[in-house]
Image: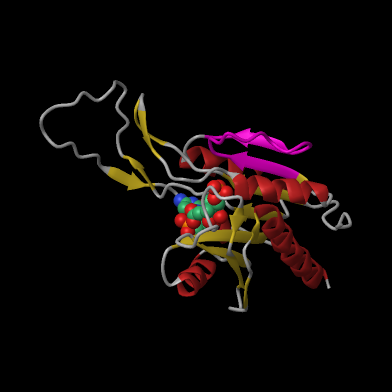
Amino acid sequence: DYSKDLEGRKIIVTAGPTQEPIDPVRYITNHSTGKMGYAIAKAAKNRGAEVLLISGPTNLSAPDGVKIINVVTANEMYEAVLNNLKDADIVIKSAAVADYRPKNKSDVKIKKSDDDLNIELTRNPDILYEIGKIKGNRILVGFAAETNDVLNNALKKIKKKNLDLIVANDITQKGAGFKSETNIVTIIDKNGNYKSLKKMTKEEVADVILDKVVDMILKKEG
Ligand code: PMT
């Protein structure tokens, strides 16, 4: 049982995939179900935090007492995070945000022809990178979904995005990453200290992340 160790803290959690429209019937997305992020939102709420969940399209419903903003695209998620950042003490970005979107969304359904079809993609904003530049006193936690060289890639993301903590999952492992009820993560801080955890439920992973966040807040506040 956790005490209300996040009482009085405001936390933004992002979760789920984004969908980037190609035309009115098609889109680009990824395998995120939102389970990891919703587990964090629920755990933070249980520990007394005021939680805002900013979620891409999922089949989940917001945990009790958690405020939710539903978004579809990376640009919408970016707007929602930025609009609510001012009030937040902690931001945890478990969403799997599309890095690219179709450059031009067709207003009508694209008809098939005998030719190949090329869809030009353009960069989406990197939400975490943008908030890293203006983070102030906030605690910023990112995730890293990796398939290779997990530790090195995650460390690069901590530095580049000005994070306090990154939660790396090697999505090639069974029981880790997208869709599963469990995750296998390595939690890395900005000094490069890391801890690899055994396979746990996403609820358990959520509490370990929040333990770290509470530690960091207490250290900061001395
Ligand atoms: O939803 P589930 O099915 O439970 O799956 C959980 C999960 C695998 C989605 C989750 O554990 C996870 O790893 N989420 C991050 C996935 C991801 O997009 O990783 P990334 O390495 O591409 O991005 C690194 C970080 O930057 C992430 O915190 C991401 O939210 C953020 N980012 C990425 C791109 C972008 N344009 N803006 C961002 O803010």
Residue in the foreground of this view, choosing between 2 and 129: 2
Q: Is residue 85 visible?
A: no
- Could you tell me which quadrant the N terminus lies in? bottom right
| Residue 44 placement, left or right of 25 | right
What is the tally of numbered marks visible in this picture?
Answer: 0
| Residue 6 placement, left or right of 187 | right
Question: Residue lying furthest front in this view?
Answer: 174
- Picture coordinates of residue 159, whole percent (x, y): 52, 70
| Residue 43 placement, left or right of 114 | right
- Picture coordinates of residue 16, whole percent (x, y): 55, 43
> Is 153 inside the magenta-drawn segment?
no
Residue in the foreground of this view, choosing between 38 and 87: 38
Looking at the image, which residue is at 51% across and 51% down? Answer: 178
Question: Residue lying furthest top in this view?
Answer: 108
Where is residue 188, by image quadrant?
bottom right
- Picture coordinates of residue 36, whole percent (x, y): 61, 50
Vertical placement of residue 159 versus 200, above or below: below
Range drawn in magenta: 51-71
Looking at the image, which residue is at 84% across and 51% down? Answer: 8
Where is residue 132, by image quadrant?
bottom right
- Could you tell me which quadrant the C terminus lies in? bottom right
Question: Residue lying furthest right in this view?
Answer: 3
Q: Is residue 204 visible?
A: yes
> Is 53 inside the magenta-drawn segment?
yes
Residue in the foreground of this view, choosing between 209 and 90: 209
| Residue 211 placement, left or right of 94 | right
- Picture coordinates of residue 204, whole percent (x, y): 71, 58
Looking at the image, which residue is at 59% across and 39% down? Answer: 55
Q: How is the image coloured?
A: secondary structure
Question: Residue lying furthest left in this view?
Answer: 114
